[in-house]
Image: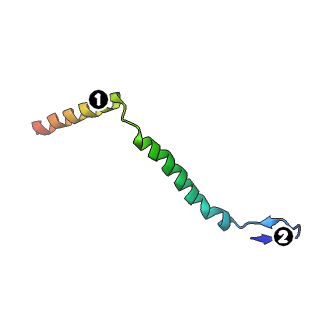
Amino acid sequence: MAENKNDAVVVSHAAVAAPLPEHLTRCLRAMYDDVLDEPVPDRFRQLLEALDRQQGAADAAD
C-alpha cells in the first residue's frame, strides 16, 4: 500500500486479488458442502435406478 498526493490510500491490484480466490473458495465450499448433505430426491434416485437396470440389461445382451 502507498499514499498518493491527496493522502488517499492506494492499494495495488495484487494486494486485493490475492485473498479473493481464497474467499471464493471458502464460500463455494460452504455452499456445496450443504448441497452434499442433502438427500437425493426420490424421483432422481428412481431415474438413476432405471438407467442402471437398462445398462445392466444392455450389458447382459452383449
Q: How far apart are the alpha carbons under marks 1 and 2?
A: 64 Å
**Residue extending furthest right?**
6
Q: Position of residue 46 (x, y in %)?
A: 29, 29
Q: Position of residue 40 (x, y in %)?
A: 36, 35
Quarter where residue 44 is shown: top left
User: Is 2 left, or right, of 62 in this rendering?
Assistant: right
Q: Position of residue 61 (x, y in %)?
A: 10, 36
Label 1, residues with CA under 10 Å away: few <14, some 14-19, many ≥20: few
Assign a secondary structure to mark 2: loop
Residue 53, placed above or below residue 16: above
User: Which residue is rendered at x = 58% and y = 56% of the image?
Assistant: 23
Q: Position of residue 30 (x, y in %)?
A: 50, 48
Three-letter amino acid code at disc 2? Asn
User: Is 40 left, or right, of 27 in this rendering?
Assistant: left
User: Which residue is rendered at x = 31% and y = 32% of the image?
Assistant: 45
Residue 61, placed above or below residue 13: above
**Quick check: marks 1 and 2 in contact, CB under 8 Å?**
no
User: Which residue is rendered at x = 41% and y = 43% of the image?
Assistant: 36
Assign a secondary structure to mark 1: helix
User: Which residue is rendered at x = 71% and y = 67% of the image?
Assistant: 12
Q: Say which of 33 and 51 sits in front.
A: 33
Residue holding disc 1: 46
Q: Of the numbered discs in the image, which one, if any, rests on residue 4?
A: 2
**Residue extending furthest top?**
43
Three-letter amino acid code at disc 1? Gln
